[in-house]
Image: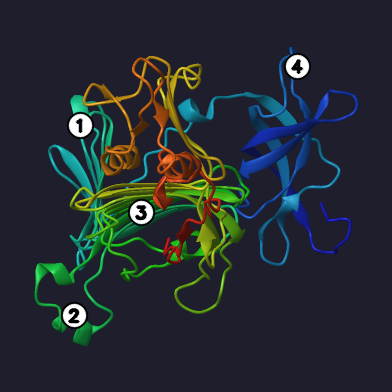
Amino acid sequence: MKHPTDTISYTPVQCMCSGVITSLIDDEESYEVRLYDSPMADFSGPVYATLMYNPGTDGNFKQGDHVKVMVNFAFGGAKNDYDGVMPGTDNYIMGMFNERTMATKRVESPLAVNSPDHIRYLNNKSDAGLIATDSGDVVLASGGSIQHVLKPFGYGLYRNMSYQMAQNHHRIVSHNPPYYFAREHFGMYDGADIEDESSRLTDEDFPMIYRRFVTQTRSPNNWVSTCEGTYAPWVGANIEEKTVTKNKDVLFTKIVNFMDSRATIEMGKPGAEFINIRVDDIKDNEKSVPVSPGATPALVGNRFKLTISDKGELDLRAASKADPSENLNAFHLKIDEDGLTIHSKGRIALSHGDEDESNNSIVLDPKKGIDITALNGFRVNDQEVLLKSFIEFLSTYRKLWCQSTSPGGPAFLHPAIEPFFDDGIRKFAEKGGFTSIGKSESASGVIKDRDRFPTV
């Protein structure tokens, strides 16, 4: 036969091929089949085939089934080779099959070495290759410095285990490089070049790090970043950084970024921020830049911050304005060797419960002052309280306290001390009065926090 579009002769050759049904044609008795095993390795298809014999209805064959297909290929031409499907011929589906059970070919290589309990496939020069044991273990090795072991069955920690040994390794799960929306990295840094490596003399000169960066969804707005080891890296686009450059001395960092809010936990930095817990408001997120370290840091304003020093000192700031330049807090609590300090922008109430403020409480109000409510009495050393200024008044005028009248008559306040008595009642205690009631300026309620720009 001759090809309709050519004067060169072609011969139809029937070949048994493997393929997958991709769709059914209109009459449901013809199928579109994509071939993946045929005499033409680069043949892309698809071909159209009908069923060879009944039963062969749409209930027996469906999209996705693996089928054997008898295809008529054109053979010959100038190259004396296969040249596509022969026009005008019919192709037939012979039946379905299971690829896993039908593919029984055994692949062997002349480089493979069979031993009593394992098969090795290694490069003789570098020892890089694969070892498969009779027990099911698989070892991937590269020059002896990197190993990946797959171990089935077993017990406890060694059951169905995947074990990896490497000085530096990266795992990347990404649908949109180079942003690497999911990444895992373990690394030990021994220098940028020979000169740098030769200058590292102690164990402390070889930083190690393990970190992960995972997004909640395909959106880069919500993500989690963890880091353990030498330092806290920049997050976001800098997760692609391949070298271990120290940025902040912490041993553990975890950052959760959700839209415009970011929660940060840091541990291990010597000094006042041995433990640092923050909640920040994202003013401007990270942006990729073409130079090291790979991205700009985010601009954040702090809303909550708790630090615990390596000496056990505590500093807590809450309900902040989230102003990156000069933050204002609504509350500040500090515990150190000097004692306890509590600042509040607004009202402070100490009581036994939600309903006890009118019964037993101490209320500090920046505008009204301090109110102590004690319906069962307010005592000091189990005695009622009297201000010192009243005692001094009695001591000063004890000889003039009363004016004598007739025996048995009333004793009036002496006219000489009456003005001092009235003045003592009227005045504020700091001005010499008997009571603590008076007037002064309201509290400012300003609690400043010059928050250092966070480095994570």
> Mark 1 near mark 4, Cβ–Cβ under 8 Å?
no
| Comes first in the chain, label 1 or label 3 | 1
Disc nearer the start of the sequence (1/4): 4
Secondary element type, mark 2: helix
Q: Where does label 2 land, which residue? A: 197
Q: Mark 3 points at which residue?
A: 211
Decide: few, some or many residues near mark 4? Use Cα within 10 Å; few <14, some 14-19, many ≥20.
Answer: some
Foreground residue, 364 or 81? Answer: 364
Query: Please, what is the three-letter code of the amino acid marked with disc 2?
Result: Glu
Numbered disc in front, either 1 or 3: 3
Query: Upstream in the sequence, badge 2 or badge 4?
Result: 4
Amino acid type of the residue tagged 4 in the rendering? Gly
Label 1 crowd (10 A; few <14 / some 14-19 / many >=20): few
As drawn, which residue projects farthest toward the bottom? 195
Measured Cα–Cα span from mark 1 to mark 2: 36 Å
28 lies left or right of 60: right
Structural distance between the alpha carbons of marks 1 and 3:
24 Å
Give the spatial CA distance, label 3 vs label 2: 23 Å
Q: Where is residue 5 in the image (x, y as percent from the top left)?
A: 88, 60
Say left or right for 341 vs 143.
Answer: right
Q: Mark 4 points at which residue?
A: 56
Amino acid type indicated by mark 3:
Arg
Decide: is 361 above or below 150.
above
Q: Distance between the residues labelled 1 and 4?
A: 49 Å
Task: Specify which label sits upstream in the sequence, 3 or 2.
Answer: 2
Q: Which residue lies furthest to the front in this view?
A: 406
Pointers 3 and 4 in contact (C-beta within 8 Å):
no
Which residue is drawn at the image coordinates 14% and 43% (left, top)?
Answer: 115
186 left or right of 352 in image: left
Q: Distance between the residues labelled 3 and 4?
A: 56 Å
